[in-house]
Image (cartoon, helix red, strand yellow):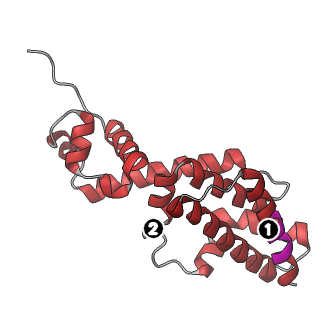
Amino acid sequence: MPPTPIITKQDIINAGIQLIRENGIRSVNARSLAKSLSCSTKPLFRIYKNMEELKKDIKKELDNYYNDFMEKNMTNENRLLSQGISYIEFARSEKMIFSSLFMNMTMAGSSLQDIIHAEWNRASIENAKVLTGLSTEKAEMLFINFWLYSHGIATQIVSNDIDIPLDLVKKLLKNAFNRFSLETV
């Protein structure tokens, strides 16, 4: 009898990510994972206690993937501007993953204060403060305005499949950055 293939935790996570990439977060369940791994559901539950634990690991892996994407594409010349452009490009290139991370309750319970005080946003706020000469409070307001504007464009691309060319995205975001910088003075 041939040996039974061993399914690893990483195999399960990778299968979950592929399911999300193709069909969204709602497609991830024990049956769909087992089918994509060509096994029964038993190996899944030998490794994970339940689907909630498994989805938590998938989310962690997706967060790392997103963070790597952003770090590779952002610059310190104007960190906030490049953050917005990168965010929108991630939405364009990974629609289902973007939707799963940013449009399916992952921000539930967050306030605008939570967002501006999040460690990963502080570098962009401090950079914007230096570029514009704004106070910390005004640079934080610039960040919020710019982040909401960028998120709006990204969600339109994802949910309505609007095709906005990268050069237009850059023009829109540069204009928004300049206007929001002046309006927060």
Q: Which residues are magenta?
A: 173-180
Write down the residue under mark 2. Answer: 106
Q: Quadrant of the C terminus?
A: bottom right
- Residue appearing at x 67%, y 49% in the figure: 71
Where's residue 41, x and y in %? Answer: 16, 43
- Residue appearing at x 78%, y 51% in the figure: 75
Nearest the viewer among 32 and 54 is 32
Where's residue 122, x and y in %? Answer: 71, 67
- Residue appearing at x 49%, y 71% in the figure: 107
Write down the residue under mark 1. Answer: 126
Instruction: Say what secondary structure mark 1 lies in.
Output: helix
Assess whether residue 176 is covered by the magenta stretch.
yes
In the drawing, does residue 163 fall left or right of residue 14? right
Residue type indicated by callout 2: Thr
| Mark 1, other Cα within 10 Å: few <14 / some 14–19 / many ≥20 | some
Q: Which mark is residue 34?
A: none
Residue 74 visible in image: no
Instruction: Say what secondary structure mark 2 lies in.
Output: loop
Assess whether residue 154 is covered by the magenta stretch.
no
Residue type indicated by callout 1: Glu
In the drawing, does residue 86 fall left or right of residue 181? left
- Residue appearing at x 88%, y 79% in the figure: 182
User: Earlier along the polypeptide chain: callout 2 or callout 1?
Assistant: 2
